Image: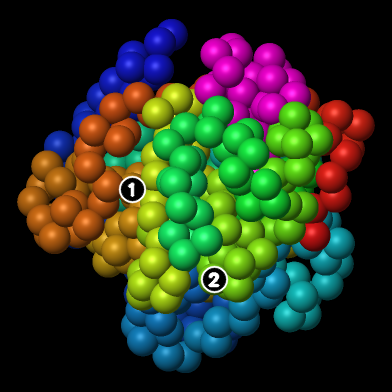
């Protein structure tokens, strides 16, 4: 399937999610049960990722009786899965109630018995293509891979993946995570492989590894997890990251230093993240109430304010529930026209190739 058809298929799935949007509210019984538990433990939710700072704040304002315990904001998807495994018998504050992980990690967690099913009130508005039919995991938002550039240190903004191999970018390019554990970094490698015209999945993963091996050999790759602070400090002047992270970082830096966010010309990869509730959640009702919050109109718009396309985006636009200024704040629609939405099988095959081959092919341990 071509990237254009893939994009159209997802757009169609989103558009037909549900024509009518009911005002879905969590039940009084669920709210009361969650308040009795008094706590929600999240993991891997940086406040500048997808607008999560405001999303968490709005949950606290709505339910002040529930304390939000935030674990390890900078963790990767694999770390979230391991946190559930490591705390199966622990009902204390180190056991996460909920996870937000890359698409490939949802089915894996379900297969390993680490998730419990729950269908939110707005379930029918989440496209079937990005949710588990039984409710064990469900898509929350998506974005595309981009380059985040420090313009004080990078004279010529790279426009495509091939540019990043040029000598002028020596010691400047980083991934936004460890490609052995971070979904964002794993898919950054896939995007690089797609830019080399490799077939999505194992082939593109291997091509992406070869690309980063070439970059590392040239001295352009920086084995540091890139984020707004490392970009501002100059240790990672160019970061391969989701567009919503780059845009959020740019907003936080507020022109100091000046930055640019670029969607590359080739290898435009779209990535979906998914939510799930731990099968061992110490606060299962608070977890369900959190999901209701995330998939409510307020929660979905909270993600959109963080430059993410939420799962219910098209249905909400159709119902006139998305302010025009939020749509205008996103990169031009043309930037997304080439976006490729890999299938779950392709994501899984790429993940296996990248996590299994990074050490031997690239050999750069990301800190």
Q: Is residue 136 above or below residue 98?
A: above
The quadrant where residue 304 appears? bottom left
Q: Earlier in the sequence, mark 2 or mark 1?
A: 2
The quadrant in which the C terminus is found is: bottom right
The quadrant where residue 103 appears? top right
Side of 222 where 307 appears, left or right = left
Q: Is residue 68 above or below residue 1?
A: below
- How far across and down, in percent of the image, does residue 238 sit? 56, 52
The quadrant in which the N terminus is found is: top left
Check if residue 315 falls in the magenta segment: no
Residue 309's label in the rendered image is: 1
Side of 80 where 139 appears, left or right = left
Residue 187's label in the rendered image is: none
| Foreground pick, 81 / 160 | 160
* Residue bounds of the magenta highlight: 183-211
Distance from disc 2 to disc 1, alpha carbons, whole Å, reads: 26 Å
- How far across and down, in percent of the image, does residue 128 sit? 40, 30
At 16% from the left and 53% from the top, the residue drawn is: 328
Prevalent SS, magenta region? helix
Looking at the image, which residue sits at the far bottom?
A: 65
Say which element carries label 2: helix
| Foreground pick, 282 / 273 | 273
Task: Answer few, some or many: residues within 10 Å of disc 2's Cα (few below 14, many 20 plus, some between 14 and 19).
Answer: many
Say which element carries label 1: strand
Is residue 1 visible in this depiction of the protein? yes
Q: Nearer the viewer, mark 2 or mark 1?
A: 2
Residue linked to disc 2: 232
- Asked if the residue under mark 1 is in contact with the one under mark 2, i.e. CB atoms within 8 Å, the reply is no
Q: Is residue 347 above or below residue 176?
A: above
- How far across and down, in percent of the image, does residue 313 sit? 26, 46
Side of 310 where 245 appears, left or right = right
């Amino acid at each position: 399937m071509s990237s254009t058809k893939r994009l159209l298929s997802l757009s169609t799935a989103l558009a037909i999610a549900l024509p009518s949007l009911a005002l879905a509210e969590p039940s009084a019984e669920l709210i009361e049960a969650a308040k009795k538990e008094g706590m929600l433990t999240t993991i891997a939710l940086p406040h500048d990722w997808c607008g999560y700072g405001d999303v968490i704040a709005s949950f606290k304002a709505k339910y002040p009786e529930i304390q939000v315990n935030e674990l390890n904001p900078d963790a990767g998807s694999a770390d979230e899965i391991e946190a559930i495994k490591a705390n199966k018998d622990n009902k204390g504050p180190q056991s996460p109630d909920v996870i937000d992980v890359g698409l490939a990690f949802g089915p894996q967690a379900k297969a390993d018995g680490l998730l419990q099913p729950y269908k939110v009130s707005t379930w029918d508005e989440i496209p079937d293509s990005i949710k588990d039919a039984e409710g064990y995991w469900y898509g929350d938002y998506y974005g595309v891979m981009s380059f985040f550039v420090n313009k004080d240190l990078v004279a010529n903004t790279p426009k495509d993946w091939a540019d990043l191999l040029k000598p002028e970018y020596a010691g400047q390019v980083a991934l936004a995570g460890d490609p052995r554990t971070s979904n964002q970094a794993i898919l950054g490698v896939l995007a690089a492989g797609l830019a080399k015209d490799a077939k999505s999945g194992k082939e593109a993963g291997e091509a992406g590894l070869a690309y980063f091996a070439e970059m590392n050999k040239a001295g352009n790759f920086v084995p540091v997890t890139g984020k707004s602070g490392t970009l501002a400090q100059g240790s990672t002047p160019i970061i391969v990251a989701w567009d919503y992270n780059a845009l959020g970082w740019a907003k936080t830096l507020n022109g100091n230093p000046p930055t640019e966010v670029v969607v590359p010309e080739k290898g435009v990869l779209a990535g979906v993240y998914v939510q799930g509730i731990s099968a061992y959640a110490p606060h299962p009702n608070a977890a369900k109430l959190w999901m209701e919050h995330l998939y409510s109109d307020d929660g979905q718009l909270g993600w959109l304010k963080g430059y993410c396309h939420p799962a219910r985006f098209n249905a909400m636009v159709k119902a006139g529930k998305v302010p025009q200024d939020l749509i205008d704040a996103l990169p031009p629609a043309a930037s997304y026209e080439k976006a490729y939405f890999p299938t779950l099988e392709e994501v899984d095959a790429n993940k296996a190739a990248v996590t299994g081959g990074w050490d031997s092919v690239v050999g750069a341990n990301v800190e």
